[in-house]
Structure formats: C-alpha cells, structure tokens
Image: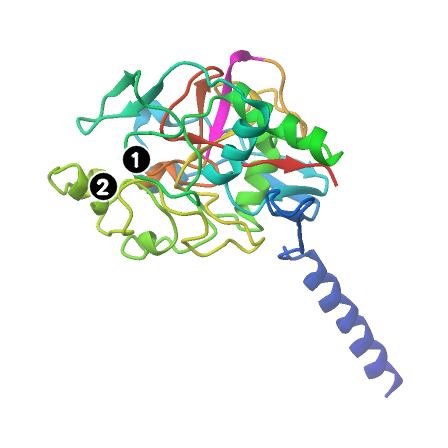
Amino acid sequence: MMGLRVLAFVLSLAAAAAAWAQPRSASTIRDCPDCPEMVLIPGGTFVMGAAPGEEDREGVPPQSRGRSQPQHQVVVRPFLLGRFEVTRDDFAQYIKATRHVMDGACWTEGNDGKRRDYKGFSWQQPGFPQTGRDPVVCVNWFEARGYAGWLSQRTGKRYRLPSEAEWEYAARAGSTGPRPFTADAASFCKHANVGDLALAEAYKHRKDTARYGICSDGYPFTSPVGAFPPNPFGLYDMLGNAWEWTEDCWNPTYDGASPDDKPRYSGECDKRVVRGGGWFNEPWRARSAFRFRDSNGHNGNMLGFRLARDP
C-alpha cells in the first residue's frame, strides 16, 4: 500500500512538472490607460529555425530556402510583448505628442505585384482604407524605435523592439510546426490575414491558388488587430497582417547565431530582420520560422511593428 502511495505521489509531481513546462497565456499589463497592452511571456528553451522538410512541404521557392537554418537551441528569458501590433491610433498619439515628421514616402504593393514609391502615401494614407485599430504601416525601423523610446520616457519602463529569437519564441508559443494552428489550407484564413482570395478579388486578379491559396479571410488589406484568434500565449496577429520589425541586423542564415535571446548586432546592419508575413504575401511566408529583411529606412505599406518591454 505504501509503495502505491509513493508511486502516486511521484506521478502527481511528474504531471505537475509537465503542466508547468507547457506555454501559458500570461496576464496582461498596461503602463498607462492608453499604452499598448503587453503580455508577460514566460522564459524557456526552444529550437529556433525551420525543421527539416518544412520548406519543401510549404512550397517555398528555392531562392527563399535556407534562411531559417541551421536549427539551433535558444534560451529565452521572461519578457513582455505587445498583445497586438501597434495600431494607427497608438502611433497617432506619438506623432501628436512629439510632432515627429515621418521620413519620405511610402512604398506600396501595386496590383501588378510591383513595388512603387508613392509620394502621396504615408502611415495615414497607405494606399488602402484602414481603421484606427488596424496596424500602423509605412513605418521604418528608426521610427518604430522612436516610438519605443517615447513610450520609455513616458512610462519609465524600457520599451524596445523584440529580438529575432524573442519574436520566434513568442510566435511559436510552444509549437514546433510551421504555425501554432492548423495546416489545413481550407482553414488557414480563419487564423491569419495573408494574400488570399479576398486580395485577388480586390486586385481583380485571376484566383490562382498557387498564389492566393484556396480560402478568403475577408480582408483584402490589413485587418483590425485581434480579428483572428490569438496564439497560446495570448498574442494576436503574430503571423500575417503586417510584417514586424525586430532589432537584429540581417544575416542570410543562422550560421554563427548565439544560443541566447539577445539581438544580433553583426552582419548587414543597414538592414534589419522582419517577421510574420503580411496581408499581401503568399501563405508560405506566414510561418513561425520564416524570416526576411528590409532596409532600416524603408517605409512600406506592409511594414509595421510590435513592441517588447523588459519585465
């Protein structure tokens, strides 16, 4: 009898430990009534990068393969991350308070699939209609950091852009596959805003399933933040909607990457890593492991950001 009790006790401890090791949706924090809502992300260890065979299964073209490899284990310390992408209403407060003058024009994705530099477009006029709850776009890396610095001064907390490792850890939320949701192509549009049949309809394009998939998310351009279900950490739109700037300099692969969560400040530092994919992109780009780069000063109507904060 005593042996059975001991065994039951040991099993209960093992179950508790296993439960504790699982990702959890943490409590939210807001440092002022109109500050972005932040989620406390628990620390942990994860394997960063695309798993063997993932890019083949996702149909990634050869020229875009290998950027998310080799896989490597990374230790991530607890941090806070924005529950949502920074919205137009959020960013408008910064512009009003600081009277910051935005850089240049905004590159837009034309309906022929080519980028154009339109002088008349900006974060207020990105080339398509938005609400105040849509993610702000046409914001370059310097301006995203400027917003973080303004919030830091205002609240006394250290706001910043997330490192690439922090971003992927938060996007995965404990998952190991391409995404923390279904791989079913017909159900994809219930989880993320990407270049789908709604975009094809808006652009009057032939509904080529190789480009636009086989479903419609209902939003041809950006969608209000929180329009799709959150991941297990309680974060919205980590995949799709707007690309998100990170702090890291661009490196074409993970060769030489650190096993910790710090940003990488070596490589091509006139370019920074962007993550998550956007409203215009093919579904294969909206993966936890997929990474791309953009010039620090580039303002594009797919480019937004999400803030991190030290605990």
Q: Residue at x 41, y 42 (%)?
A: 134
Q: Is residue 115 magenta?
A: no
Q: Is residue 272 magenta?
A: yes
| Vertical placement of residue 22 versus 132, above or below | below
Q: Is residue 230 visible?
A: yes
The residue stretch that appears in magenta: 267-275
Main SS of the magenta part reads strand
Q: Residue at x 71, y 60 (%)?
A: 20
Q: Is residue 260 visible?
A: no
Query: What is the number of the mark on residue 177?
Result: none
Point out the image quarter for the C terminus.
top right
Q: Measured from the top left, where is residue 234 in percent x and y? A: 56, 54
Residue beneath disc 2: 199
Q: Is residue 295 left or right of residue 99?
A: left
| Vertical placement of residue 195 versus 25, above or below | above
Q: Measured from the top left, where is residue 264 in percent x and y? A: 62, 21
Labels 1 and 2 touching (C-beta < 8 A):
yes
Front residue of 305 and 4: 305
Query: What is the number of the mark on residue 280?
Result: 1
Q: Is residue 259 left or right of residue 246?
A: right
Q: Residue at x 63, y 36 (%)?
A: 308
Tell me the element at label 1: loop
Crowding at dot 2, Cα within 10 Å, few <14 / some 14-19 / many 20+, comes out as many
Q: Is residue 13 left or right of residue 197?
A: right
Amino acid type at mark 1: Phe
Tell me the element at label 2: helix
Q: Measured from the top left, where is residue 282 in percent x and y? A: 29, 37
Q: Residue at x 53, y 22 (%)?
A: 143
Q: Residue furthest bottom?
A: 1
Amino acid type at mark 2: Leu
